[in-house]
Amino acid sequence: MEITSSIKYVGVDDLDLDLFESQYIVPDGMAYNSYLILDDKVAIMDTADRRKGREWWNNVNEALAGRTPDYLVVQHLEPDHAALIAEVIERYPAIKVVATAKAVQMAPQFFPGMNIDANLMAVKEGDTLSLGKHVLQFFTAPMVHWPEVMVSYEQSEKVLFSADAFGKFGALCNGGSWECEARRYYFNICGKYGMQVQALLKKAATLDIKTICPLHGPVLKENLGHYIGLYDTWSKYEPETEGVFVAYASIHGGTAVVAERLADILREKGAPKVVVTDLSRCDMAEAVEDAFRYSHMVVCAASYDADVFPPMHDFLHHLKMKNYQSRKVAIVENGSWAPTAGRVMRAMLEGMKNIAIAEPMVTIRSRMKDEDIPALEQLAEELL
């Protein structure tokens, strides 16, 4: 694939991967993106996961067409992008590995028993590297989503090599909507670091960008304002969609009935969008995505061992880890003798930033009854 006449795509699709980072379901596979810039000097932009090393080398060798690379630019040391650094150095002993000072410090940790110090070349904010007509300018992007990350801007063709920013789940050959899998990717991979993403967006705003080349997902060439705008919204923790996300954790079905009834009430009262998720059976990463996407949330859970049913505890723990904030949340608990779920959920939510708890909290005793409906109606009103 050509990005431009001088910039080639040499990445690979992984259709055999079941869990990205051993936790995120990727039914459409994963792309490990890598690029090659051909000029007076040749630069490889990142490598790939060792799982696909043979395919990556085939792509690189074909694009090189016998030339020898001068630089390997490492924007991110995570093994899905940097696992093949040692092989590159072994094949090209004179190559310079260009990275941030933090990456230079960390790199030897990943290649024990191999001395790569002589190959490592640290760059700092704003430094440039001339390849001939092409000039790379480097901008640090710490915690997007590791501390050593940088992005690279190619000045002549106005290409931003954006590291993990603007990436998405899914192999390139499978296509699919960018927004859905980019959103799930963003909130689960980078969601904790909204402030750092905002800092990167401010740097990007000073550049004339025509193409974005991320380390996962498609190369973006059109309507860049749309993608950048979504990243701005997401990293400010602002809701993307007005609506209510109803997440429930039910043991024997009683809490599920309550959640679905509340969702119906919300729709009847004019909620613009209502989405219901069973936390015991859903993709947790998608539940996290929806919690961030919508303006309001309801958590409904059964009590369990004087606490809360574990799928809900797991969900709220994930939200706290990813810096969930600035939302209005309603609580519905269920308990047959000593309800505790509401107390636990409230405490977990109050440990997050700028979370407004809708009142009243509704308590169900085992099964929803007619006399519970007015409380659900009132709670729905608080969310609209």
Image (cartoon, grey):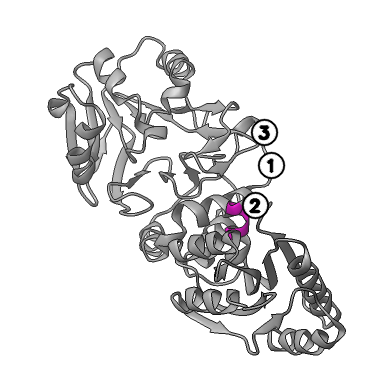
Residues at marks 1 and 2, CA–CA distance in whole angstroms: 9 Å
Q: At 70% from the left edge and 69% from the top edge, which residue is drawn?
A: 246
Callout 1: SS: loop
230 is higher (above) or lower (below) than 362: above
Identify the magenta region: 284-288
Find residue 110 and name its label: none
Residue neighbourhood size for the residue with mark 2, other residues' Cα within 10 Å, grouped as few (<14), some (14–19), many (≥20) = few
Dividing the image into 4 quarters, which one contains the N terminus?
top right
The picture places residue 113, in percent across and down from the top left corner, at: 17, 22
**269 lies left or right of 210:** right
Q: At 52% from the left edge and 64% from the top edge, which residue is drawn?
A: 234
N-terminal label among 2 and 3 = 3
Please state which amino acid type lies under the numbered disc 3: Asn
Q: Quadrant of residue 227?
A: bottom right
**355 lies left or right of 334:** left
Find residue 174 and name its label: 3
Q: Please name the residue that numbered disc 1 is placed on.
A: 176
Q: Please name the residue that numbered disc 2 is placed on.
A: 180
Callout 2: SS: helix
Q: Nearer the viewer, residue 7 or 321?
A: 321
**Is the residue under label 3 in contact with that under label 1 (CB below 8 Å)?**
yes
- Residue 326 visible in the displayed image: no
How many discs appear? 3
Magenta stretch, main secondary structure, is helix
Callout 3: SS: helix
Q: Nearer the viewer, residue 183 or 73?
A: 183
44 is higher (above) or lower (below) than 176: above
The picture places residue 138, in percent across and down from the top left corner, at: 29, 46
**Is the residue under label 2 in contact with that under label 1 (CB below 8 Å)?**
yes
